[in-house]
Image: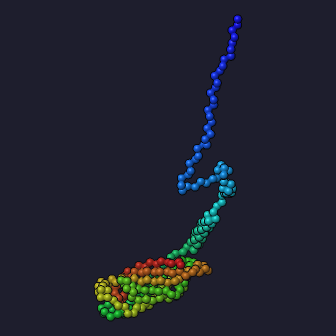
Amino acid sequence: MADRVHPSVSSPSPPPPPQSTSNPPEKSPPPAGTYVIQIPKDQIFRHPSPDNARLYHKYSSRKPRRSCCCCCLCWFLALAALLILLLAIAAGIFYLVFRPEAPSYSVQDISITGFNVSSASPISPGFNVTVRAENPNKKISIYYEKDSSVRVYQSDVNLCNGVLPAFHQPSRNVTVFQTKLKGSGIVLTSAVRETLLNLQREGNIPLKLKLKAPVKIKVGSVKTWTITVKVSCDVTVDKLTASSKIVSKDCDFSVRLW
């Protein structure tokens, strides 16, 4: 007799764990003194902002341009270089055509009166100075204008003053002229008088003559503006009388163009 098979009774499956019905934990509030700013998502994920993007595109697409100041500076430097070049060429042509030479000056004679160094009274010396001016240029003449000055010093003491005659010196010319200088009320200290007496015994009295004259140079048919010529001469005489003689002399001159 066949065995009867009875179906097995399975044990019931365990029930699913109960779902929690509690709410999720709340976020802790921000600390006191802080602020929470909410920004839309479209602004968080878009970088840069539309306004900044437009500005970036505007300035990045602009072509680089030279500064106006830089252009002006370049033009100025170019014009200055051109002007210097033209002046150098003109000076070279002028020298080749006219061959300018510097004039020369020297003191030929000095006659002194009214110079009594043995008296303590004020003196009024007079100097009669003979000056030789040479213009060696072939195509250049010199016009000596008014408002000149001539002064004689001894140990920084201004002894007398005068002026030069106004005259025109043609090319390749030597002009010898005299100028009378006069001093008034010159007071010499005892030390200066003693020094002059000793120098006069030695026959070696140094004097300094300073000459300043406004001149105009004529080159061909063109006359320049007024130029100031300054001449400084170291002259040594044997005595302070009308019959004084020059022992030594040395003159230098300079020119002020403006």
Is residue 216 found left or right of 206 in the rendered image? right
Asked whether 160 or 219 is in front, the reply is 160
Indicate the position of residue 254 as horizontal and vertical percent values: 47, 77
Q: Which residue is drawn at 47% across and 86% down?
A: 149
In the figure, residue 33 lies in which quadrant?
bottom right
Is residue 176 found left or right of 93 in the rendered image? left
Is 27 above or below relative to 17? below
Asked whether 35 or 210 is in front, the reply is 35
Q: Residue at x 57, y 71 (%)?
A: 91
According to the image, what is the colour scheme of the structure?
rainbow
Q: How many marks?
A: 0
Indicate the position of residue 14 as horizontal and vertical percent values: 62, 27
Indicate the position of residue 63 as horizontal and vertical percent values: 68, 57
Q: Residue at x 66, y 19 (%)?
A: 9
In the figure, residue 249 lies in which quadrant?
bottom left
- Image quadrant where one finds the N terminus: top right
Say whether residue 47 is visible.
Answer: no
Identity of the residue furthest to the top in this view: 1
Is 81 above or below relative to 257? above
Asked whether 4 or 257 is in front, the reply is 4
Say whether residue 39 is visible.
Answer: yes
Indicate the position of residue 199 as horizontal and vertical percent values: 31, 84
Q: Which residue is drawn at 58% across and 72% down?
A: 94
